[in-house]
């Protein structure tokens, strides 16, 4: 009797509430660069997993993922209270915050694709000036041995 559509709607609403609360309500500076990417709710609507990413302030700066995880852990109670107040469901789901691996995996895949493109370009460059081993077209020309037989 699991209603997956209801779970998806609740997950979407939870991600909106948490993102809004992190932006406007929770005053922790470690959460300034946290972005909520997705939320998943179990079929019984008792547990919610909220996925997040942490961006660096500059391109060269490494994001503070440990600080953001600690800040989210300390703000879980407040965020759960806000989710309960704004959703109006009988049982407020417990919140678990998990760092989203999709951006890191996408970056890794882009690096692999760039390396593959570079190696393909190197192979194409080497093949451009290559000549076949032996005759240029050994199978099309009639052989001298065939004429004598």
Image (cartoon, helix red, strand yellow):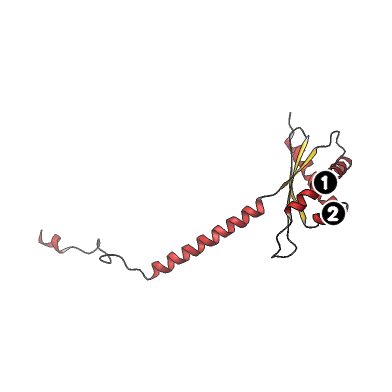
Position above or below: 14 against 130: above
Residue 132 is situated, as x and y percent measured from the top left of the image, at 31, 65
Q: Is residue 86 left or right of residue 50?
A: right
Q: CA distance from mark 2 to mark 1?
A: 10 Å
In this rendering, position of residue 96 left or right of residue 26: left
Quadrant containing the N terminus is top right
Residue 59 rendering spot, x and y as whole percentages: 70, 65
Q: Are marks 2 and 1 in contact (CB under 8 Å)?
A: yes
Residue 74, numbered circle: 1
Quadrant position of residue 55: bottom right
Specify whether 139 is left or right of 25: left
Q: Which residue is mark 2?
A: 28
The residue sitting at 59% across, 58% down in the picture is: 110
Q: Quadrant of residue 125?
A: bottom left
- In the picture provided, is 85 more to the left or to the right than 61? right
> Camera-side residue: 43 or 80?
80
């Amino acid at each position: 009797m699991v209603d997956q559509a209801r779970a998806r709607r609740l997950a979407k609403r939870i991600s909106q509430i948490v993102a809004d609360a992190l932006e406007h309500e929770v005053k922790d500076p470690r959460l300034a660069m946290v972005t909520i990417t997705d939320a998943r709710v179990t079929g019984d609507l008792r547990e919610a997993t909220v996925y997040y990413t942490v961006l660096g302030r500059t391109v060269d700066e490494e994001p503070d993922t440990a600080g953001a995880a600690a800040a989210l852990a300390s703000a879980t109670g407040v965020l759960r209270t806000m989710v309960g107040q704004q959703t109006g469901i009988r049982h407020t789901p417990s919140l678990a915050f998990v760092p989203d691996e999709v951006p890191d995996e996408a970056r890794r895949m882009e690096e692999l694709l760039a390396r593959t493109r570079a190696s393909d370009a190197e192979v194409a460059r080497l093949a451009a000036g290559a000549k076949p081993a032996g005759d240029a077209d050994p199978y099309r020309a009639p052989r001298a041995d065939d004429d004598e037989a």
